Image: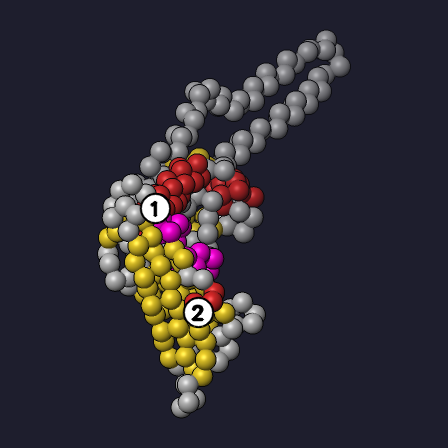
Amino acid sequence: MIIACPACTTRYVVPDSAVGPEGRTVRCAKCRHSWFQDPPEAASVAALAAEPTPPPAAPQPAPPSPPRPEPEPEHEPPRFVRSAPEPEPERAPPLSQEPVAPPPLAETSYIPPEPTGASQFEAAPPFRRRRNTLKLWTWAAAIFAALAIGTIAAASYWGLPDWVPVSRPTFAMAQADLQLDFPADQQERRQLPNGTEFFGASGTITNIGGEARAVPPVLIVLRDARDRIVYSWEVRPPKRSLAPGESVTVNEAVTDVPRSARFAEIGWKPD
């Protein structure tokens, strides 16, 4: 349909659906004037009513009646009277054949009206940028790989913390060329007269290799009947280094050990 601004008479071509069956308030893009636009049917009726109607054609005069011939005397021969010519009817002026210029098209800078609700012609915000899922997953994998490498490096350098639920060996691996000998008959467990629990152990450390070796600390562990560790302590050998073939005797005793301790295990202390 074609709508025209009442203020500046600028005409626009808009779809019928933009106005709706009940009409709406619109605004001119040129002079910014707002008015209520009737629906297409009402606008068509108003446009037809606004067009000027052509003036009615002038009534054609009725042709005059022919005059009656006068009677002539009987002695005279009859004469024929010629009637007056009828006037030609007036013709209506011809309609203008000039072509009517089509209405101008809607301007590209047309600004939709400002209704209270949402409109399909209302300016929409810019579209949101679509997220690149593959890129996000790539970043997540890179961060996870960096954290995993850092954790492995830290565990290799400092070891696992104590709160990590991982089974650890009670004793360290056997030392090269060092032989640890603590026979069971040299281990003593008894109760002192004052009621204190006593435990003593005696053994030797021998270097059976051909080179001098450093002697690490010794660990003594006491276990109960269910093979649980109830007490442990570290023993420093009298000598920190042994020459080839040399041996050293270790005698160690402690008191106040748990009553539930049943047997002892002796080995190298882990790092």
Q: Which residues are magenta?
A: 159-179
Q: Main secondary structure of the magenta part?
A: loop
Indicate the position of residue 263 as horizontal and vertical percent values.
50, 69
Is 135 on the left-hand or right-hand side of 49? left
Disc 2 to disc 1, how far (Cα)?
24 Å
Q: Quadrant of residue 171?
A: bottom left
Identify the residue at horizontal 65%, vertical 14% (top origin): 81
Q: Three-letter amino acid code at disc 1?
A: Ile
| Residue at the limit of the structure toward the right, as seen here | 74
Q: Can you say whether 87 is above or below 227 in the image?
A: above
Q: Secondary structure at mark 1?
A: loop
Q: Three-letter amino acid code at disc 2?
A: Gln
Indicate the position of residue 143 as horizontal and vertical percent values.
36, 44
Indicate the position of residue 67 as horizontal and vertical percent values.
65, 23
162 falls in the magenta region? yes
Identify the residue at horizontal 41%, vertical 61% (top origin): 182
Residue 187, numbered circle: 2
User: Around disc 2, counting alpha carbons within 10 Å, would you say few (fewer than 14), some (14 to 19), or many (20 or more)?
Assistant: some
Identify the residue at horizontal 39%, vertical 30% (top origin): 104
Work out whether residue 243 or residue 92 is closer to the camera in this orientation and state it: 243
Identify the colour scheme used: secondary structure
Residue 208, numbered circle: 1
Residue 167 in view in this figure:
yes
Indicate the position of residue 68 as horizontal and vertical percent values.
68, 23
Work out whether residue 215 or residue 38 is closer to the camera in this orientation and state it: 215
Is 85 on the left-hand or right-hand side of 131? right
Residue 151 in view in this figure:
no
Q: Quadrant of residue 13?
A: top left
